Image (spheres, rainbow, N blue to C red):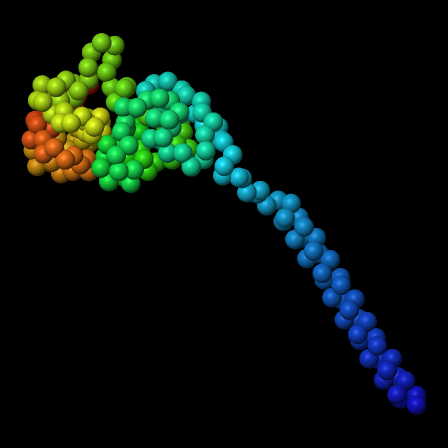
């Protein structure tokens, strides 16, 4: 009898010990989980507007926009700068080309939030006072306008092409302007315009 009683007592103690140990181990885990939940960032509702400051054509513009807004939509829909055109809206035609810094980008694939703090130059920002930019003048001189819809993107891309040092030959100009598509088969006139404007642009 005494042996059985001792065995029951021993089993009870082991269970009590295990239960106590498990409980004491869960307390810090639970506390840690609560602390991590408190530190975890709260997901923002994508539909809520966010503030962004864009520097466009030398001027700062403060906007409250959907976080998913592209540079193109910020320019056209919020700032009413409609020179940059929405063509394919898939980054394939180049009609929306602008310069961000010294780099040409398709603004329909670039988020406005990613462009914050950088200089954005659009077709509206090329001319100074009453004087056209050399590339704008060259497009007029060489009848390179075509139907006109893709022309702003063509001109912005042409300026970028020259600044990147890719206007040294007609083959180079065609290659580095090939991201801008038109349907009017006027590429010879565009190549001529880029060749004309390149020396003046490179002089600064």
Q: Is residue 105 visible?
A: no
Q: Residue at x 34, y 26 (%)?
A: 76
Q: Horizontal and vertical percent for residue 54?
A: 40, 25
Q: Determine the residue positioned at 32% across, 38% down.
A: 109
Along the line of sight, the residue nearer the viewer: 202 or 69? 69
Q: Can see residue 183?
A: yes
Q: Position of residue 45 (x, y in %)?
A: 53, 39
Who's the residue at 34% across and 18% down the image? Answer: 58
Q: Quadrant of the C terminus?
A: top left
Residue 102 sits in which quadrant? top left
Indicate the position of residue 197 as horizontal and vertical percent values.
13, 22
Quarter location, residue 30: bottom right
Left or right of 20, for residue 162: left
Is 75 on the left-hand or right-hand side of 175? right
Image quadrant assignment for residue 174: top left
Q: Quadrant of the N terminus?
A: bottom right
How far from the left and from the top, in percent, is residue 124? 27, 19
Most extreme residue toward the right is 1
Which residue occupies the extreme top position in the image? 130
Q: How many labels does the image show?
A: 0
Question: Which residue is painted at 72% across and 62% down in the image?
Answer: 25
Residue 171, compared with residue 64, is above or below; it is: below
Q: Out of 29 and 184, give the one closest to the viewer.
A: 184
């Amino acid at each position: 009898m005494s042996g059985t009683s001792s065995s029951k007592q021993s089993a009870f103690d082991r269970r009590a010990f295990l239960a106590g140990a498990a409980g004491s181990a869960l307390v810090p885990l639970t506390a840690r989980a609560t602390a991590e939940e408190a530190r975890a960032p709260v997901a923002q509702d994508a539909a809520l507007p966010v503030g962004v400051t864009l520097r466009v054509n030398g001027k700062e513009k403060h906007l409250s926009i959907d976080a998913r807004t592209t540079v193109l939509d910020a320019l056209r829909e919020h700032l009413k700068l409609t020179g940059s055109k929405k063509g394919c809206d898939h980054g394939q035609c180049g009609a929306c080309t602008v310069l961000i810094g010294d780099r040409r980008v398709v603004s329909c694939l670039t988020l406005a939030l990613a462009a914050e703090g950088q200089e954005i130059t659009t077709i509206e920002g090329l001319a100074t006072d009453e004087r056209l930019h050399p590339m704008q003048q060259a497009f007029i001189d060489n009848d390179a306008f075509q139907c006109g819809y893709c022309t702003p993107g063509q001109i912005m891309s042409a300026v970028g092409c020259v600044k990147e040092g890719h206007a040294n030959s007609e083959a180079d100009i065609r290659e580095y302007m090939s991201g801008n598509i038109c349907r009017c088969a006027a590429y010879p006139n565009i190549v001529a315009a880029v060749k004309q404007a390149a020396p003046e642009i490179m002089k600064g």
